[in-house]
Each structure stands twice: as C-alpha cells, then as structure tokens.
Image (cartoon, coloured by chain):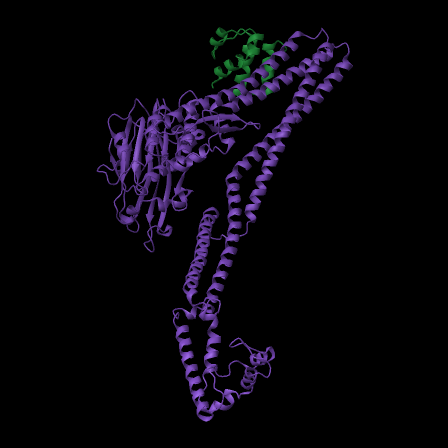
Amino acid sequence: MASIINKISLQNFFNYYGSYDANTYDFKEGINIVVADNGAGKSKLFNALLWVFYNELLDSDLKIRRNIESMAVKTISDMAKNEVSIGESVDCGVRIEFQDSRFTYQIEKKFSATKISDKGNMTDVGCWEINSYDFEVSRKDNMLLRFKPIFEENEKNEIVNKLIRKDLRQYSFFQGEEVEDIIDFSKKQSIKEAVRKITNISKIEELEKLSFALREKAENDYNRKSKENAKNAQELEQKLTAKEKFKKQLEEEKDKLEVYKKNHSEAKQESYDLEDKIQNSEKKIELKEKRKELLRQQKNARNDYEKFLDGINARFFDGNFSWIAMGLNDLPYSFLGKKSNYLDVVAEKKTLYRLKNNPEELSTVLPLDMPDTMTLDKMLQDGHCHVCDRKAEKDSEAWNYILKLKNRPSSNQSENQLFKNDFKSFFEEIQLQSQPFTGKINSVEESISNSIQKLNEHKARITKLSDRLKSNQNELKELLKSDDIDASTEDERNILNSYEGAIKRATQAEGRIIRSKDTIKELLKKISGIDEELEKLRGTDVPTEYKEAFELLTDISDAITNTRENTFRNMLERLEQFSNRHFKNLVKYNELSGGILKFKQTLSDTIELDVVDGNNNIISGSSEGFQRMKKLAVVMAIISAKGSGFNYPMFADAPLSTFGKGFIKSFFEEIPNVFPQSIILINNIYDAESDNKLDDVGNDLLSNDSHVSTLYLNEVEDVPQVERRTIISKLK
Amino acid sequence: MNNIELIKEILSDSQIKEKFKISQSDLDNLNGDSRYQKQVVQVVKEIVADNENHISATKSYNKLKNILNIS
C-alpha cells in the first residue's frame, strides 16, 4: 500500500496561530484540495513539508530556501509572538501523520523560543532565544492504538523517506514554477535522468560491468589453457598479443567516444541554454542599433525644427514671403492715388507759377522735366518726336521746339522756392522699397498656411521619432531587465559568439562520434578476425569446459548489453506512450490540440522531446498553460511508466497557476490515475465574491458527484499582521 | 525491475533463447528459490545475485567456476 498522509497539523507556524488542534488538516486517499487566496497560508503549508523533508523553509522575501535555524523567529506566528511577555516562550512546530499498509507514523519538527527583550521589533532575532530544535518520530502498528517513539536518527530519516522517497520527491513534491524545472525540455539530460531513475538502469549497467569482468577472466583462463596445449605456442602468443593490442585500442576508442558524447551533449546543452539568450541578444543588438539611428534622426529633426523656427521671424520681412504685408491688399492703390494727387498738385502749382512769371514762355502739358534730357537728345538726333510720333527734321519748328525743351531750366533749379518740402523722392523711395512686398500681398495667407503645415510636419516628425524611441526604449528595458539601455553591446556579442562556438563544437563532436563509432566497428571486426585465427591455433587438446565457459559468459554479457539497451528503449517508448495518454486527457477540455509528444534519443544518448502535429511537423510556441501541461504529462508518465504504481502522495503548491478552467477540470480528473493521494494547494478556484468563496469549477469539485475526497478553505481577515491568523474551514 | 524480472529479460534475448533452447515455460517457471537445470540460467541467476550483493568479479568468478566445471 502507498503512503497516505492522514493529518498535517501546525502550531504557531507563520499565520497558523495556536495549537496543533486548532490548525489541523485531515486528509484522505484520493484528491485533497486546499483553497486559499494569496497570503492565506498555502505556501506556508508547503513550507511545513519542506521543514520535514529538508529542514528548510522558503523565505518569501528573498525567494530562496533557507535553513530553519536561520529564520526561526520569522517562522513563529506574529500573533503568538505578540502575546508573550519577557521570559515567556512560544512553541512552533509541524506534525505529520501518515500510514502505509502496516504502520502509522508521526513525524514532528518543532522548537520553542523565549522572549528575552522587547526592545525593537518583535521579529528582531535579538529579542528571542531559541531553546531547542526537536525532531521526533513515532510509529504504531495499524492494529494497535499506541505510538512508540523511534530514537535512532537513521531510522527516523528512513521513515521520512517513506513519506515520499527522496529520489522521486522531485516528481511529486513541488511548487508551481518548479514544474518548469522537473522536466526541463531544453535540458535533454533531464528526461534521460528520469528514465534512468524509473528503470533502475544503473543496476543493469553495474551488472553489465560485472559480466564483462567475468568474461575477461574466463577468456584469460581459456587462453592460459590454450597456451599449455598449443602446437604452435609462439604464433598463438603473437595472435593473443595482437588481440590484446586491439582490445586496448578498442577500450581507448570507447573512452574517446564517451568524451565526444559528453562534449556533444554539453555543446548541445550550451547551445540550447543560449538559444533564448541569443534571440534576446540578437534582438538587443538590433534594438540598440535602431536606437542609435533613431537618436540620430531625432537630433536631425530637432535641428531642422529649430532652423525652421528661426526662419519664421525672417519671413515677415523677407521679400520672398513678405508676411508683414498681410491684410494690406488696398494699401498700394491708396498709396498710388495719394502719390498721383501729390504730383498733380505739384505740376499744377509749377505751371501756374511759370505762366504767372513768363506768360510768353513755352507752356506744355507735359509733366515737369519730362521727357528727360536723354530722350530729348535722342529725338533731336532721330529728327522725330517720340511723344507725338511726328517728324521733327533738323532746324524745323518742331526740332527747335524739342531743342528748347532740352535747354529749359530744370524745375528744381528754378521752382524750389515754390515748395517748402519735396515729397516726390519720398514717395518714390517708399514705392521702390515696398515693391517686393506689394507684389506678394495676395499670396501671404497661402504662404503662412504652408508654413504652418510645414511647422506641423516638423512637430509630427519629432513626435513620431519620440514615440518610436520610447517603444524601443521599453523593449530594451524589458530585454535588458535594466534601465541602463545605453550600455555597450559587448555582452550580447559575447553571447552570439558563445552560441556560434557551441554550435561549432556540437557539429565537430558529431563528426567525431560518427568516426569513432566507425573505428570501433573496425576494431571489433579485427578482433573477430583474430578470434577465428586463434580458434585454429588453440589446438584440440584444450579442455572444452574452458571454451564453453568463455563462450557462455560472452553470450551472457552480450545479452546483458542488449537488455540494458532494450530496457532504456522500451522505457522511452512507454514514457512517450504514457505522456501522450496523460497529455490527451489533460487537454481534453481545450479546443486546441496540444500536439503529440515525441521522445528521441540523440547522438550523445540524451533524450530530445519534440511536440509534433499529425503530420509530424514540429509545433512550437504553445501557451504557458500548454507548456506546463506537457511537463505535468511527462511527470505523470514518469510515474505511470514505472508500471508498479506510485507509492507516495503528490503534494503540490499552485501547480495550476497558469491554467484555465478546462485545464483545472481535466487535471483533477487525471491526477487520481497516477497518484494514490494528491494534496493540491490552489487559489485558482477561489472567488472572494462568492458566498462559499469558490468559483464554478470549485463548486463542481465540492459537489458530491466529484471524486474529491476533502476540500479545505483557508481565510485570513484583513487586520494588522500581529492579529493575522489563518482560519481553516473544511468544506468537504 | 526486480531480480527475477531482470533474469527473465536477459534470458529473453533472442540469441540466448535460440542457442540455449530456452522455452517460454522455462521463463515462466523462473522464481527466486528454484534450482535451475540449465547451466545458462544458473549462471545468469548467480551473476544477478552477486551484482545485487556487490560481490567482486574475482569472488563471483570463483563461485561460477563450479557451475562452469572449470575449477
């Protein structure tokens, strides 16, 4: 009969405040569930067994296992510590009762602590004195009532080992994330180790060694007898020496092969270990290079933006843009009108002045000083008036009139006194200076609109680059697990180089393994050839018993070698078969098929596990839930493939943390097929809003139809830590 | 795999079965206490037991010499 845990009791152990009686779980064969929200004592219950098995506890602050002595004060319930005065003691302990077909056992680990000071925090080690650590084991015959204490330390440890055998403990005593490590698909060695454990293959290996040694001794005796009776002893001796030489070479080659296999296995393992990192490294390098480029682009974009902003002010006065003229569309017409009015007034005043002073003088309707001297010269030279387009031949009346105009005194020379100020040049200067602006007035609004668009484009470019940089920065931080995202990429390059090196070494070792196996075949062939020659030289007088003994032991050692190889191969097949059976059952409530698990022996004799689809194509990238299910399926297969059943309980804390409802349901249906008793600590089915604190899956498990033996609910009130205690309620 | 299962597995090897004419009933009748008639069965049984008891190769061979008639 398997070991079955009947009770686990806790005394002032973390939040389990109070005596053993106040904190007892009664478990049964089959499925036992402890449901608790985070912080309600699941992991502490797991810790109780850690203490029993390994004298260790998981320090939830440091996430490491520590020896009980190093965290004794922390282990005692705060509520209990708070209640005692100086000089008083608190007892803290764990008691487990379990039974097999004949006996019931009690294991208790405990200590007491006395308060010696109340200075500082009550959890301070200096405030407490630990009195003693006790490890007590007692046993009773199932037919009797009284427990008898066990005193021998070895016997006590053997009884602890009966609870869950030490070498199989990793397959049935684990916390959620530890499932990842039990069967690490990336570590080919881990499946091989599992197969070795469940097949007792090391025993067959030892037997094989013994059979080789026996064969060797039989051969030595046979050779000795042959030499005594040989007709040609010298030739026989030579052949025997030659055979010894080949045998020695064979042994050396086998040793070499083992080294090549080891190298291959290590290089492969290294490459697998680096595979995750290498993807990260490649990604890191890519992201860092992208970051450099983005930073460069961002700098350029900012410079362009700054330049553009600087140029914006210039556009008010730059004749190419003339923004200052915006809204002045009517001003040029108004200006020209005013200028024209001014000139008319000036011309009128001058004409009237001349007429008044020289009534006989030539009067003209031409504007003052018009045409200019150069034009008048040309007209005189051409003999043609370009104003009225008539002939003005030299010395004609018209020609003399033009000459007279040319020789007339300049208006400035004679008429300055008519005006206090002359605004003509003022108007002309304004007209000249405003010429570039007046021509652009109509396009200023469009120009400003274009510039605003350009400005927005600059801003958008900067924002886009900032967003890309931010995203790049987040990805880098996530990958680097650090804020120092601008550190050099040297580490990544080293990882890439290491990966390439590992692949190269694995390939090199593969070649060596193949060549070494060929060499071994050659040497065996040579030895076999020598054996045939030796038989002829041994003569007929050698007692047949010696020959028969040698041949018999040779046949037996060959058969043992075959047995070892077959055992391993058969177990691998069984493991594959059971893994797939469990896996199929575990994923049956999921719409997606998880694939088929395939185990394969590698060149270096380790085991590779692939997940393939119906067409034998490798599937990768399943969800975390599926991945963990595969591992649980393999763990279950390791137990099932043993064939003789598993004689120990499964005790798991949060094994289902990444599972959906379908997985949880199928897990509880499948687990009794593998483990005679399972104690599962979970929060997945806890529902704070529900009356009984269970969700629909939890209530299904609670119902009488389910095959759950016991179901406990752990709760803690939302009170200060010194008042906090776990309340255990048995729901089933 | 216990010792009897291991002995059966070794004697189930096709070459051994054929060469030493080991029948299925020979295998079925194997148990820890019986005296085995066939030399090969006795030798395998001895080797498996010696291995279980961590007997050295020299001591084991000396014991086997009697069964193998080479003492």
Which chain: green? Answer: B
Q: Is residue A317 left or right of residue A656?
A: right
State the residue lying farthest toward the front: A396
Q: Quadrant of the C terminus of chain A?
A: top left
Residue at image x 28%, y 35%? A24
**Labels in figure, total:** 0
Image coordinates of residue B68 in percent, x first then y, are 60, 10
On screen, residue A460 above or below A648? below
On screen, residue A233 above or below A712? above
On screen, residue A463 above or below A286? below
Of A554 and A368, the residue lying toward us: A368
What is the display colour for chain A? purple
Residue at image x 62%, y 17%? A215
Residue at image x 53%, y 44%? A282
Image coordinates of residue A474 in percent, x first then y, are 44, 50
Image coordinates of residue A406 in percent, x first then y, are 55, 85
Q: Is residue A502 left or right of residue A42?
A: right
Q: Is residue A297 left or right of residue A639?
A: right
Of A333 and A218, the residue lying toward us: A333
Q: Is residue A449 left or right of residue A222?
A: left
State the residue lying farthest toward the left: A691
Of A593 and A266, the residue lying toward us: A593
> Is residue A200 in view?
yes
Of A312 and A375, the residue lying toward us: A375
Image coordinates of residue A132 in percent, x first then y, are 37, 42
Task: Name the quadrant containing residue A234.
Answer: top right
Q: Quadrant of the N terminus of chain A?
A: top left
> Is residue A148 in view?
no
